[in-house]
Image (cartoon, grey):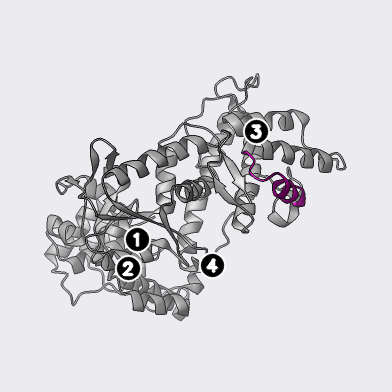
């Protein structure tokens, strides 16, 4: 999520001059962010993996032609400190899917799809086939990216996260500012915390306090009444439509120097526990923004934000799409698809289309034994949808996009199975389109 509203505000400032990256420059790329950035730039389909693969290959070729050293960081599974932020993202995804469902049922044209479940695995496979250096992080990749930026001389972070505007010692280029081609080289608009603070006319310390109040992945759930020492100007700023600029003006007027820190309010609803959680969130965010590797590691090991992380249960994608009632239970986990595991081990590399056909056999066999058998029209269409992102013959009720809601549910279920099988360590995905070189490999 990053800092709320900060990217939009920064885009309105006179930015640094675009810089062409010199040979031997190290670029540190947020892998998950890159996968979503690539996905946003390819065709509107349910599984745009071939196009994503091709675009990633072009960008890697441009980076190499420019003589850049490329290191890609992927998030790990341990991200309890960000469960609240993850919950908000999944809530947004749920709203997207509901909008798509309504459009399909109404026969309206589609304008957007949430990114496919396999985009990160696709990018991993593409990078692996190109021998690009990849680092799998234990926790959030942001932390490792920031620490690497201090260790690597003149390294630049490529990402889409406004937290990097606020982290000490980091050079940050948003994906939207990057231009890369084999002929013209690689250039980007590169920001540092010092430069942003200077353009805002405030200290770096004040920039951090503003970021905490605006809300990030750790402090985003807190509002003005949760803080103890906010002035009337700061409270009004948080309620205004120009929150960043209004907080900037408050910081200047009230001289937010290194002695000023926003504090959680005691005696609030939730008592000492709520106060402690808020204090822990502020400490964690400040440690992150100071790029204090040891301090951050101690807090991660101590799981200081665990009480915050446990407050809500995240909705699952199979629940959002109502897949549970459509796909037999034993076809939704790596352990429950022994037929697919056996098929892959016997066949070796197979395309997604071939694997989809095998999965259909499993579903038809299991569904035939139950009253809730999957409609045959959905099963016949699935392979077409997985291969091409749409039906060859559009369903009569949906002439705009060649998809029915059942197609999406089955296609997403199938891709989730592929993702889960890969995540269980059974496979290495690469080029998961349906070209001859596209394959799931054991």
Q: From mark 1 to mark 2, how far is it between C-alphas?
A: 22 Å
Location of residue 381 with respect to 176 vertically, above or below: above
Q: Which mark is residue 98?
A: none
Q: Is 37 situated left or right of 106 in this image?
A: left
Residue hosting label 4? 311
Location of residue 297 with respect to 90 vertically, above or below: below
Q: From mark 3 to mark 4, how far is it between C-alphas?
A: 34 Å
Query: Label 3 crowding class (10 Å Cα cut-off): few <14, some 14-19, many 20+?
Result: many
**The magenta stretch spans residue 121:** no
**Rendered residue at 23%/66% (across/down):** 169
**Rendered residue at 53%/42% (across/down):** 116
In the image, the segment drawn in magenta is 338-351
Residue hosting label 3? 407
Q: Of 396 and 254, which appears nearest the observer? A: 396
Q: Earlier in the sequence, mark 1 or mark 3?
A: 1
Write down the quadrant of residue 374 in the picture.
top right
Residue hosting label 1? 215
**Secondary structure beneath disc 4?**
loop
User: Would you say the residues marked 3 and 2 are in contact, meaning their CB atoms lie under 8 Å apart?
Assistant: no
Judge depth for marks 4 and 2 and give the one in front: 2
Picture coordinates of residue 131 (x, y %)?
A: 43, 51
Residue hosting label 2? 147
Q: From mark 1 to mark 3, how far is it between C-alphas?
A: 38 Å
**Secondary structure beneath disc 2?**
helix
Location of residue 188 with respect to 206 vertically, above or below: above
**The magenta stretch spans residue 350:** yes
Q: Is 210 situated left or right of 96 in this image?
A: left
Query: Label 1 crowding class (10 Å Cα cut-off): few <14, some 14-19, many 20+?
Result: many
């Amino acid at each position: 999520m990053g800092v709320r509203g900060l990217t939009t505000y920064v885009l309105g400032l006179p930015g640094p001059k675009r810089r062409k990256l010199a040979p031997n420059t190290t670029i540190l790329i947020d892998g998950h962010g890159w996968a979503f950035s690539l996905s946003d730039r390819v065709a509107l389909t349910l599984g745009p993996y071939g196009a994503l693969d091709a675009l990633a290959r072009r960008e890697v070729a441009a980076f190499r032609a420019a003589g850049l050293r490329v290191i890609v960081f992927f998030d790990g599974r341990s991200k309890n400190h960000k469960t609240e932020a993850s919950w908000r993202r999944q809530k947004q995804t749920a709203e997207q899917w509901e909008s798509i469902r309504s459009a399909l049922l109404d026969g309206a044209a589609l304008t957007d799809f949430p990114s496919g479940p396999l985009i990160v695995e696709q990018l991993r496979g593409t990078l692996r086939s190109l021998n690009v250096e990849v680092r799998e992080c234990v926790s959030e990749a942001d932390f490792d990216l920031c620490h690497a930026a201090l260790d690597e001389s003149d390294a630049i972070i490529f990402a889409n996260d406004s937290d990097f505007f606020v982290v000490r010692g980091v050079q940050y280029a948003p994906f939207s500012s990057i231009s890369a081609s084999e002929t013209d080289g690689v250039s980007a608009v590169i920001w540092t915390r010092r430069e942003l603070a200077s353009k805002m006319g405030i200290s770096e310390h004040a920039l951090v306090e503003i970021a905490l109040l605006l809300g990030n992945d750790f402090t985003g759930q807190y509002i003005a009444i949760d803080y103890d020492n906010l002035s009337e100007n700061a409270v009004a700023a948080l309620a205004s439509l120009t929150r960043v600029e209004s907080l900037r003006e408050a910081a200047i007027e009230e001289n937010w120097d290194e002695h000023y820190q926003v504090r959680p309010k005691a005696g609030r609803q939730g008592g000492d526990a709520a106060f402690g959680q808020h204090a822990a969130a502020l400490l964690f965010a400040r440690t992150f923004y100071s790029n204090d590797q040891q301090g951050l590691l101690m807090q991660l090991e101590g799981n200081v934000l665990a009480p915050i992380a446990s407050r809500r249960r995240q909705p699952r994608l199979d629940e959002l799409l109502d897949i549970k009632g459509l796909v037999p239970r034993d076809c939704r986990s790596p352990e429950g698809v022994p037929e697919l595991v056996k098929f892959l081990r016997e066949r070796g590399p197979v395309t997604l289309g071939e694997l989809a056909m095998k999965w259909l056999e499993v579903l038809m066999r299991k569904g035939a034994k139950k009253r809730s058998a999957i409609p045959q029209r959905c099963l016949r269409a699935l392979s077409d949808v997985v291969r091409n992102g749409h039906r060859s013959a559009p369903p009569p009720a949906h002439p705009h996009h060649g998809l029915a809601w059942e197609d999406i549910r089955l296609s997403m279920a199938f891709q989730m199975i592929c993702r889960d099988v890969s995540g269980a360590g059974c496979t290495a995905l690469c080029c998961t389109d349906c070209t001859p070189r596209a394959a799931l490999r054991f």
